[in-house]
Image (spheres, grey):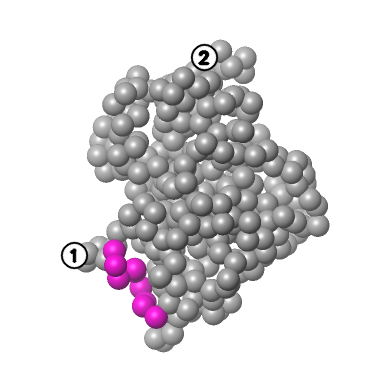
Amino acid sequence: MACQLPKFWPGGALARSETSRSQDPTSLQPLSGGSSHDAPPVSFDHVLHRRPSFFTEPSRHVQLNTRRQKGYDMVKWCNARSQMQGLTACYYTDARLTTIYRTGQAAPYVSWNANGYQLPAEAEWEKAARGGASGHRFPWSDTDDITHSRANYYVYQQNGTNAYACDRSPTAGWHPMFYHEGWPNTSPVGYSAPNGYGLYDMAGNGCEWCWDWYSDTYYSSSPTTAPRGPSSGAYRVLRSAVWNWLDANGACCANRFNFNPDCATSSHGFRCARRL
């Protein structure tokens, strides 16, 4: 099978669907001051223990112990980290942006101009993932192939041969370095080489929550400047591939998924960002 090499926005900002206006340019607000990698459990716990009022649901500690984090928890974590560092929170429970979102499971309102931490929009995530390597499948520019030496993902085979032409890994199945006692595992933060922007693990290791509500048709008529997804929906966007079941096609920069933000799974993580 051939790995997807979809149409891209000029500048490598966002992959659009086959029915979209792929020739449209886009402009994204710059992001900085966030994280070069997924937020590891120790960082999540540090913020949790410093700001426990942000996580008061009865199931919160059980969820943390298994590292099963809901999409809404990621947003509250961003607010908690912002307040720890004396920054202005980005997420609120009211349209006037007066009450900081700390508890509950509800879609918050966003202050896009606040200087605190936030989940990246899907377009921002993909531009960051490409690391300046516009037009390539993965977060590197020297090849459009992928191997276990570059990412933690599942090598899918058919009849003893890698199923995807772009998958050149000599090792099949789960990553042999992180397969222990019959179970696949995540790789350590920063194990793989960073992309052109200095960001780690943008292909594989774990799916990452984005801010946007998911829609199959949004990019056929989305704004050309700073698209931030539909105004409502049932599922949020996830990007990247997860170590225990997504293959080379799932690890492509342009691949997108969706999940209910009120549900939790150990396969999903996040990385936060700040506005310049």
Q: Which mark is residue 140?
A: none
Provide residue 170's location: percent of width, then percent of height.
Answer: 39, 80
Q: Which residue sits at x=34%, y=22%? A: 51
Q: Secondary structure at mark 1?
A: loop
Position of residue 239 in the picture relative to residue 184 (left or right): right
The residue where tag 2 is placed is: 99
Provide residue 97's location: percent of width, then percent of height.
Answer: 59, 17
Position of residue 179 in the picture relative to residue 206 (left or right): left
Q: Which amino acid lies under the numbered mark 1 shown in the image of this protein?
A: Glu
The residue where tag 1 is placed is: 181
Q: Looking at the figure, which quarter contains the C terminus?
A: top right
Residue toward you, 100 or 203: 203
Provide residue 59's location: percent of width, then percent of height.
Answer: 29, 31
Choose the circle earlier in sequence order: 2 or 1: 2
Label 1: how many residues lie within 10 Å, few (<14), some (14-19) or many (20+)?
few
Position of residue 194 in the picture relative to residue 40 (left or right): right
Residue placed furthest toward the left: 181
Q: Which residues are magenta?
A: 170-178
Q: Which residue sits at x=58%, y=71%? A: 142
* Residue 104 in view, yes or no: no
Provide residue 7's location: percent of width, then percent of height.
Answer: 71, 63
Residue toward you, 269 or 40: 40
Q: Which residue sits at x=37%, y=58%? A: 191
Q: Looking at the figure, which quarter contains the N terminus?
A: bottom right
Residue toward you, 120 or 242: 120
